Image (tube, rainbow, N blue to C red):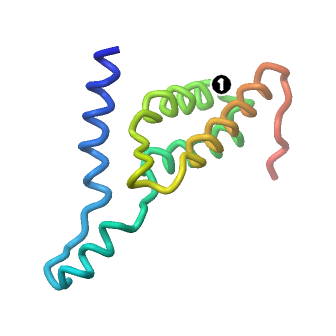
Amino acid sequence: MGEYKRLVTLLNRFKQMFYYYDDEDFSPSEKKYIDNIKKTNPYGLLVLIFGGVSFTFGPQYVILPIATLTIAILTLGTFDKEKEDNPWTFMLGSILSLIGLYMYIVGAVHILI
């Protein structure tokens, strides 16, 4: 469990790069307002996008849903209830990848035109 905690700490440090903005021209009240706005977890967005790809191409390439679920499990610990909106991006991406994995297992495929 210690390794997972270190991974989450490392991912949280990388997450700060997504939230960086140039605040030289802002007043202190504007900076405070911007810092209080809840943000979206960038790893959740990544899981959501990969979940959509897994849903689309997962029935043909099983590695996509498996990789998406692995990323979702590893990065779910980076979600901060105080600073971020909601965990729905993780949930929706995971559900889409589970559907892609299920479709692979039962042999169903999309007909993409």
The residue drawn where x is 35% and y is 67% is 36
- Residue topped by disc 1: 62
Foreground residue among 103 and 3? 3
Q: Is residue 18 placed above or below 9 in the rendered structure?
A: below
Percent of width and height locating residue 56 = 71, 42
Q: How many labels does the image show?
A: 1
The residue drawn where x is 63% and y is 36% is 94
Percent of width and height locating residue 35 = 30, 67
Q: Residue furthest left?
A: 24
Percent of width and height locating residue 41 = 44, 51
Image quadrant in which you'd find residue 69: top right
The answer to whether residue 49 is left or right of residue 8 is right
- Assess disc 1: are there few (<14), some (14-19) or many (≥20) residues with their C-alpha within 10 Å of its C-alpha: some
Foreground residue among 20 and 97? 20
Q: Is residue 98 placed above or below 84 in the rendered structure?
A: above
The residue drawn where x is 32% and y is 56% is 18
Q: What element carries label 1?
A: loop
The answer to whether residue 50 is left or right of residue 24 is right
The answer to whether residue 74 is left or right of residue 104 is left
Q: Residue furthest top?
A: 1
The residue drawn where x is 85% and y is 44% is 111
Q: Which amino acid does label 1 sit on?
A: Val
Q: In which quarter of the image is the N terminus?
A: top left
Image quadrant in which you'd find residue 13: top left
Foreground residue among 111 and 97? 97
Percent of width and height locating residue 76 = 47, 35
Image quadrant in which you'd find residue 4: top left
